Image: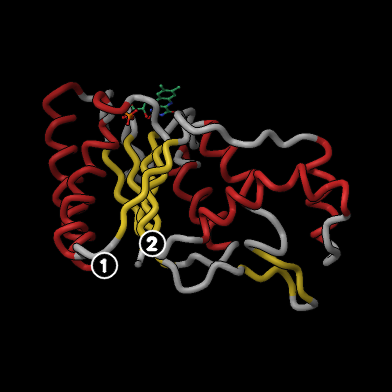
Amino acid sequence: MKKLLHIIATPRMDESRTLKVANLFLKAFKTKHPGWSIEDLNLYKEELPELTVKRIDGKYVLLVGKELPEDLKEPWQDIIATIERFLSADIYLISTPMWNFNIPYRLKHYIDIILQPKYLFQYTPQGPEGLVKNKKMVIITSRGGDYSTADTRGFDLQEPYLRTIFSFVGITDITFINAQPMDAMGDEVQHQKIEEAQRVAQEVAEKL
Ligand SMILES: Cc1cc2nc3c(=O)[nH]c(=O)nc-3n(C[C@H](O)[C@H](O)[C@H](O)COP(=O)(O)O)c2cc1C
């Protein structure tokens, strides 16, 4: 069965503007693809492995194309399980607010865990190669301000970061839906912008 993995990077759940948009996306996606499984990965509810020195040692071993030695296999079990769950999906939906012009730290933690050589990328004589092929990603964000104008675009470190990191591992089909501004222009604009983003989210889901 095909799977959409919904990576939730806001702790606010019912209060979340990002999830208000994501919920409409998911509703439209389920109607279009009734046979798909939809799995939530809530980064604020689930434990993520810590990047201890031993686990980091393993990254350096894999970077040079070697296998993990016996003493690193056990510390790496949780990392491999987290990576396998990520790789089990065919489509990714990431729901993330902007925090300090970038992503919330739990999403960065998740990225630091899964971005491992041998699994998501490898070095070749021609340079780095992404290993996550033929997958699509939709990223729904919401922001207090508006970063869509020429004057403000440079402050948005979130979209360029996420595009860079996921295209590095091979996911190049990435669609962003940014609901903005959520805080800077008052409630009326907030509601209008959420509705606009919900309409776009439905259209994107229907085309997947
Ligand atoms: C810790 C924190 C940092 C934030 N940093 C920014 C920021 O740098 N730029 C911005 O426009 N909004 C910022 N915001 C506002 C949120 O992006 C905005 O309220 C968003 O809609 C929250 O999404 P949520 O309701 O899904 O949690 C920040 C909010 C929090 C809680």
Q: Image point 57% across, 56% down: which residue?
A: 84
Q: Which residue is mark 1?
A: 208
How far from the left and from the top, in percent, is residue 146?
31, 36
Q: Image point 60% across, 50% down: which residue?
A: 81
Of residue 105 and residue 181, the one placed in the foreground of this image is: 105
Quadrant assignment, res 165: bottom right
Find out if the beta carbon at label 2 lies less than 8 Å from the nearest ligand 1 atom.
Answer: no
> Split into 4 quadrants, where in the image is the N terminus?
bottom left
Alpha carbon separation for disc pair 1 and 2: 9 Å
Q: Image point 39% across, 31% down: which residue?
A: 10
Left/right placement of residue 146 relative to residue 67 reads left
Q: Which residue is mark 2?
A: 91
The answer to whether 56 is drawn above or below residue 128 in the figure is above
Residues under numbered marks 1 and 2 in contact, where contact means CB atoms less than 8 Å apart:
yes
Going by the picture, which residue comes out furthest to the bottom? 126
Left/right placement of residue 12 relative to residue 53 reads left
How far from the left and from the top, in percent, is residue 21?
22, 42
The picture quadrant for ligand 1 comes to top left
Mark 2 residue element = strand
Neighbourhood count class around disc 2 (C-alpha, 10 Å): few under 14, some 14–19, many 20 upward: some
